[in-house]
């Protein structure tokens, strides 16, 4: 009998032959989410990203950069065999992507296996997500964050919050169903607005008491139930620094794995320079300040203060949407005005 995943790949390749590889990949992933048998078969020809207690396994490359370790299914099987672990553990893998040739990518948390033993066999280290996120490249960090978010969601949703009955996942791990019912649970994200407030010539950044010394960022806050993005931005800015927002423009979005899964919605928010005096709510922010272009450019060149050295002002690193908003604002300030 033909392997169901090979059948699926060849029929999708036929039906999408006039489309891009991206279209094939999206349809392939969508089919695996819906077809448990094909997904099971895809797993046995897949690559896997390994985690331990939600920490990704990272390796240091020759050029001193870091990347996540991806092992082929058979290598993971041999690794588990070598460590005397139950092979059925691989069935807990969660689908996170695929190549354009139909090799699926899964992630798997091996929390029940000795971390040091895996690290030794794999020649790599399990690294805390916050640290990993900033060690990895711009292209890899979001995928590792997505994998960890899905693994965390499964770990914390083994029971139905309504009936208390246990829940069971589909093969891909894209949802869970309450046992003996039709109730389906999907992974959730919390929408968070993040706004770079500006008054024409300056932009506003704040810091929470929990931030590392010297770090200033754009204002952020969780959306309340029923709020639009615009309402959430207006409310957060009013609550945190006492300013009235005049207009809001959308810039971009980002999945942010901290504290759990936040969906960051990045905006610019303008306020009137005539009404720019801050009234900070110190229960939310330790400090907030207006920065001019020169101060922002200096801050972008600085990084976290080393122990014993004077504190410098610095901004979130490039992966963070706050950084992207600050850079975009600088570009807008330094662009030549359009000809009349
Ligand atoms: N990617 C980036 O560039 C940046 C990302 N961020 C992220 O934005 C997020 C929000 O910013 P922050 O200023 O802390 O938010 P808020 O200003 O909304 O303050 C956080 C408080 O909101 C309450 N809250 C409401 N809904 C939630 C929820 N779903 N989950 C957790 N807390 C909730 C909690 O208060 P209580 O418990 O009292 O109800 C919490 O202490 C942070 O997690 C931060 O990591 C922030 C800056 C930059
Ligand atoms: Mg906030």
Image: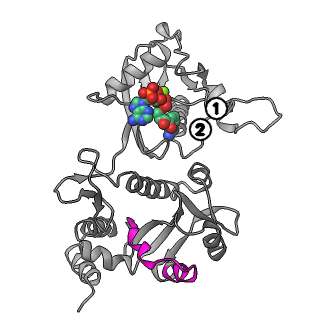
The residue under label 1 is 215
| Residue 215, horizontal then vertical, whole percent | 64, 32
Residue 268's quadrant in the figure?
Answer: top left
Q: Residue furthest top?
A: 274
* Main SS class of the magenta portion in the image: helix
State yes or no: Cβ of the residue under disc 2 lies below 8 Å from any atom of ligand 1: yes
x 54%, y 22%: residue: 204
Q: Earlier in the sequence, mark 1 or mark 2?
A: 1
Does 9 appear above or below 286? below
x 33%, y 30%: residue: 229
Specify the quadrant that holds the N terminus.
Answer: bottom left
Question: What kind of element bears circle 2?
Answer: loop
State yes or no: discs 1 and 2 in contact (Cβ < 8 Å).
Answer: yes
| Left or right position of 234 against 317 | left
Q: Residue furthest bottom?
A: 1
x 22%, y 66%: residue: 34
| Residue 280, horizontal then vertical, whole percent | 53, 14
Asked if residue 231 shows in the view, the reply is yes
State yes or no: Cβ of the residue under disc 1 lies below 8 Å from any atom of ligand 1: no
Query: Quick one: label 1, few (<14), some, or many (20+) residues within 10 Å?
Result: many
Query: Quick one: label 2, few (<14), some, or many (20+) residues within 10 Å?
Result: some
Specify the quadrant that holds the C terminus.
Answer: top left
Q: Which residues are magenta?
A: 77-95
Does 1 appear above or below 69? below
157 part of magenta stretch: no
Colouring convention used in this rendered image of the protein: one colour
x 23%, y 72%: residue: 16
Q: Residue furthest right?
A: 308
Q: Toward the viewer: 238 or 277?
A: 238
């Amino acid at each position: 009998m033909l392997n169901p995943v090979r059948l699926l790949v060849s029929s999708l390749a036929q039906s999408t032959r006039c489309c891009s590889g991206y279209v094939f990949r999206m349809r392939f992933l969508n089919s695996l989410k819906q077809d448990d048998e094909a997904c099971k078969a895809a797993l046995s020809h897949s690559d896997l990203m390994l985690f331990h207690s939600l920490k990704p396994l990272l390796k240091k490359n020759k050029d001193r950069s870091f990347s996540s370790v991806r092992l082929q299914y058979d290598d993971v099987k041999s690794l588990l065999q070598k460590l005397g672990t139950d092979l059925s553990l691989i069935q807990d893998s969660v689908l996170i992507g695929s190549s354009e040739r139909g090799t699926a990518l899964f992630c798997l948390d091996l929390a029940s296996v000795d971390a040091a033993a895996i690290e030794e066999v794999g020649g790599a280290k399990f690294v805390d997500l916050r640290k990993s996120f900033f060690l990895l490249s711009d292209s890899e960090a979001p995928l590792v964050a997505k994998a960890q978010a899905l693994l965390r969601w499964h770990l914390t949703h083994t029971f139905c919050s309504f009936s208390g009955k246990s829940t069971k996942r589909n093969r891909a791990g894209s949802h869970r169903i309450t046992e003996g019912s039709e109730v389906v649970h999907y992974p959730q994200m919390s929408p968070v607005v993040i706004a770079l407030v500006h008054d024409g010539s300056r932009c506003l950044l704040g810091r929470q008491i929990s931030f590392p010394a010297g770090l200033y960022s754009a204002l952020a806050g969780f959306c309340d139930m029923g709020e639009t993005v615009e309402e959430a931005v207006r409310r957060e800015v009013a609550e945190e620094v006492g300013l009235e927002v005049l207009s809001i423009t959308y810039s971009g979005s980002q999945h942010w794995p901290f504290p759990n899964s936040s969906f960051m919605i990045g905006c610019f928010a303008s306020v009137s320079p005539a009404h720019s005096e801050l009234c900070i709510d110190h229960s939310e922010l330790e400090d907030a300040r207006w920065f001019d272009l020169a101060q922002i450019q200096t801050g972008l060149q600085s990084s976290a203060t080393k122990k014993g050295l004077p504190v410098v002002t610095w901004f979130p690193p490039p992966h963070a949407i706050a950084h992207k908003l600050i850079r975009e604002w600088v570009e807008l300030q330094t662009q030549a005005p359009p000809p009349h």
